[in-house]
Structure formats: C-alpha cells, structure tokens
Image: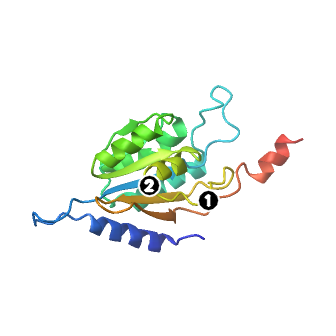
Amino acid sequence: MRVPIRFAAACLALIACGGVELHDSSAPPAPTVVFLVRHAEPVYPPPPDEPRNPPLNEVGRARAEQLAHVLQDAGITRIVSTELHRTQQTAAPLAERLGLAVEPYDPNDLAGLAARLRAEPGRVLVSGHSNTTPELVRLLGGDPGEPIDEKTEFDRLYVVVLAPGRPPETTLLHYGAPPQPWPPPWLEDEAGR
C-alpha cells in the first residue's frame, strides 16, 4: 500500500512534535528517531570501470531530491551512509540543505551501528541497501515488514522511534514517484538480444 506524500509529511510532522523538549525537568528524554532508506535508482547497466559501485541515474537523483524535500524539516541532526556512490548520492541533497556531513558506516557492522544509534539521542537519516536497511530496522527493534523488492523498490522510508522505556515504534512510508521495474523491461530486452 502506498502512503500519499501529504499523509507522510503529516506523520513526520507529528513525529517531530513528539520530540519537542519541554522545560519541565520531570519530562522524559526526547526519543531517538531514525529514518532509514534504501538508496535511490542507480545507473543500469553499471559503468564498466565501477560495476559494483554505480552512481544514481536521473530518476534516482530526482528521488534523492524528493527525500531531501520530505525530510528537510524533520529535525535531522546526523546523516550516515555506506561509502558507495548510490547511498552517498541519495543522502547528499538533504545533507547539503541541512549543512551536515554524510558520515560513513560499515555495512558489515550493523549491530555496532544499531548500538550507536540507540545510545546517541537525535534524529538520524541512514542511507543503505536493500539488504542492510531492513536488517538495521530489525536490529533497532523495529518491524522491517516484507523484504524489499530488489528490482522495484527504491521508495521505502522507515521511521523507527526509540523512546526510553517504551518498545520501538516503526512506521513504513513511501516517498517520491512510484518506482518503475528495475532494470527497465526495455533495457532487459535489448540486453537479451
């Protein structure tokens, strides 16, 4: 089921309001909110000089801009990404708008990243992959839902809220234009000739 962008924005606004710090010393600490995405659409076929590290294509670059638009007012304080072009480029427009650096993380140490995210309060965007993003949601105690479709899903946005003394809450949203099958059927047809 697709979530309309206005509804997604309203959910993000409600989440943002939940983290407002009150001046009452008895108020509970603000929750940590982790936004997790798979990278946007990469170039296909990948460049021969970097077959395992393609950049984003035009559709992917537009999706990265849409992500920045959706999250620009969500109070993001930190952005982390794997070191591959497609994940870095997915996070870059938001980082640029917010004046934040994109910090690299090791996708082979998701348990360590999950522990750091739980320990450090704030609002964090994590840009990952179809296999690392749901696994990180799970390691944070959230519900990753169905596996990400490798060929078609580039629009999934998880929001995991980690509030002290409460179980993690997961919201699954979608952003940007509906994704197209990947690689495009016409490209597969040409490659099969």
Tell which tag, 1 or 2, sits nearer the viewer: 2
Question: How many marks on residues?
Answer: 2
Instruction: Say if 46 sits above or below 186 in the image.
Output: above
* Element on which disc 1 rests: loop
Amino acid on which the number 1 mark rests in the picture: Glu
Number of other residues with Cα within 10 Å of mark 2, as a class: few under 14, some 14 to 19, many 20 or more:
some
Instruction: Say if 45 sits above or below 67 in the image.
Output: above
Residue at the spot of label 1 = 146
Quarter placement of the N terminus: bottom right
Q: Residue at x 31, y 43 (%)?
A: 100
Q: Residue at x 71, y 38 (%)?
A: 45
Residue at the spot of label 2 = 141
The foreground one among 27 and 22 is 27
Amino acid on which the number 2 mark rests in the picture: Gly
The foreground one among 115 and 178 is 115
Task: Indicate left or right for 19 with 44 as reference.
Answer: left
Q: Residue at x 21, y 59 (%)?
A: 29
Q: Position of residue 23 (x, y in %)?
A: 10, 65
The foreground one among 165 and 172 is 165
Task: Indicate left or right for 31 with 138 as reference.
Answer: left
Q: Position of residue 181 (x, y in %)?
A: 71, 55
